[in-house]
Image (cartoon, rainbow, N blue to C red):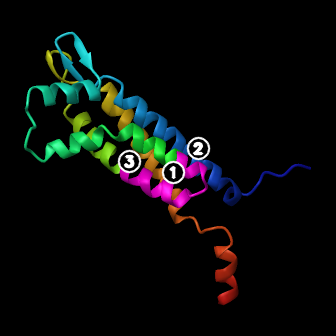
Amino acid sequence: MWQAPPVRSLLPRITAGTSAAGIVLIVLGTFLDWTRSGSVYRDSYQSIGVLKALDFVEGTALTVLLDVWMAIVPVATVAVIVYAFGLRRNAAGLLSALSVVTGTVSVVAAIRVSGGEASLGIAGTGPTVTLTGSVLALLGATGVLVRPRPGEAARVGRQT
């Protein structure tokens, strides 16, 4: 008779799947609508381009955040590659940092979503999807980081 595997043995797959879904949603969310100007919607990268072109952020601390935001896709790609090479904790640490940055920006933007009557403002789709992905990715990465390394539990049991 078939028995379901214990949850402990499924945990690595669950955390990897949660992290993967989070990465996909983070990246996808950055390409969805973030700002609205009249009937024109712009993704986060187009919005950053407008801010930089108009020199609204030049010489401020926000410039660093915008530069970090432009690195989301490369950082997510590196995290996936590092995970594929078996360095799961390193990938989880990188993904945690990415999730904190994208989640913080997304939650601020999601709070600032303007109503349908405003012709200029924050659109809700991109920030909401990115925030959802950030939460999922952070949950998955946390699961990887708090789980004992393979064989570590057995060593700890012998020492006591």
- Kindly identify which numbered label has been placed on residue 2: none
Magenta residues, start to end: 81-99
- First in sequence: mark 1 vs mark 2: 2
Q: Secondary structure at mark 1?
A: helix
Q: Amino acid at mark 2?
A: Gly
Residue found at x 56% / y 51%: 83
Q: Amino acid at mark 3?
A: Ser
What is the distance, in whole Å, between disc 3 and disc 2 at their CAs? 15 Å
Q: Residues within 10 Å of mark 1 (few under 14, many from 20)?
A: many
What is the distance, in whole Å, between disc 1 and disc 3 at their CAs? 11 Å
Residue found at x 14% / y 29%: 51
Q: Residues within 10 Å of mark 3 (few under 14, many from 20)?
A: many
Looking at the picture, how far across and down is residue 56, in whole percent?
7, 33
Q: Amino acid at mark 1?
A: Gly
Q: Is residue 54 left or right of residue 66?
A: left
What residue sits right under mark 1 in the picture? Answer: 140
Q: Main secondary structure of the magenta part?
A: helix
What residue sits right under mark 3 in the picture? Answer: 99
Residue 45 within the segment the image draws in magenta: no
